[in-house]
Image (cartoon, grey):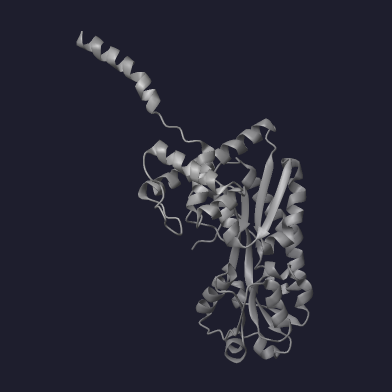
Amino acid sequence: MERVRCIIKGISDVPKMMKLEKHIEISALRIFSVLAESQTLTHAAERLAITQSAVSQALKQIEVQVGAELVVRRSRPILLTPVGQILKEYADRILNDSKRMLSALASASNNGTTHLSIGMIDSFGEAAGHILLEHLKPTASHLALRIGLISPLSKALLEHDLDILITSDPMVDYPELERHPVFRDPVVMLVPESIPSSVAHDVKKLAEQYPFVRYNRQARLGILTDIVARRLNIELNAPYELDSTQTLFRFVQAGSGWAFTTALCLLQHPSLLQGIRVMPLNNGANARYITLLARHREMRELPSQVATLCRDICDSHLLPRMKLLAPCVEGQAYSITEMPPI
């Protein structure tokens, strides 16, 4: 009898438990996620294109559902409570999973063809982007190409705004990404023709006698510049720090100093190489590596296939142009299928 009473009690409790269930809508989670990343309610409303009262109402509704405050009241900028911080982590995961689910459903409904969004660093994108997209046209109903700086492109990949990223940053701290090496891009020297040939071949003499034109220290190529200088044990007298390859080429062309760049960057502005010697650096020992990144197993074999296509484009289209501009890159620039050992 005692067991029967327990079973009956369990059955009678079901409606009460159902009443206590809390379901937070995905739309409300999106509002909360944007709010958590904003300075004020007004800022969040502007980003979401809704009214401030709608943001406030959504926040209050979630707080009622979880039974706790999510933001510190009257804080500027907006600060999350400990409960709010936990919800933000879960909200971001759910929103990303939702994007992934919709993408998979769209792919299935289109018999495997769907929208494909690809990001590329500017040096690769400007040289090869149009060729790659022409080859990819049969694989997707819509292709989008975003060319730009590494940091925003990396963020876009992690936030599922990009499907594939071709970059010089392998993003090794993110195990959820798969990596496909594409190309070895050697560092070369740009030396104005006004500098004597006897000095132009000697990086130590250049560093001692002439000003250096460098990439911005926060940029990936700027970081590579510092690494190369340390390896060569040279001090760079760098009165000019620039964030554009085009501007850097113009400074060297004007005789303002010498510089480091890479073979791939030469293809961006070949007309600006007039009056400039492209010289090998340390027999090509220093290089950056272009890699294709994608979220692990999300697109099956497509990232590997795109990487193979990128290597073919490098070998058949980019390398011949590089060798015309800089014969010294022969044997230094080439497509790769494996990253070198660290």
The vertical placement of 194 against 153, above or below, is: below
Q: Residue furthest left?
A: 2
Residue 315 visible (yes or no)? no
Q: Residue furthest top?
A: 1
Residue drawn at point x = 45 percent, y = 59 percent: 76
Q: Residue furthest front?
A: 53
Residue drawn at point x = 54 percent, y = 79 percent: 229
Q: Position of residue 257 (x, y in %)?
A: 66, 85
Q: Position of residue 127 (x, y in %)?
A: 73, 62
Q: Horizontal placement of 336 versus 143: left or right?
A: left
283, 40: nearer the viewer = 40
152, 175: nearer the viewer = 152
Residue 5 visible (yes or no)? yes
The vertical placement of 312 against 245, above or below, is: above
Q: Position of residue 139 (x, y in %)?
A: 72, 41
The vertical placement of 276 against 100, above or below, is: below
95, 219: nearer the viewer = 95
Label tally:
0
The vertical placement of 111 against 267, above or below, is: above
Residue drawn at point x = 73 percent, y = 85 percent: 254
Q: Horizontal placement of 319 versus 239: left or right?
A: right
Residue drawn at point x = 54 percent, y = 52 percent: 44
Residue 331's quadrant in the figure?
bottom right
Q: Position of residue 92 (x, y in %)?
A: 49, 45
Q: Where does the N terminus fall, quadrant-wise?
A: top left
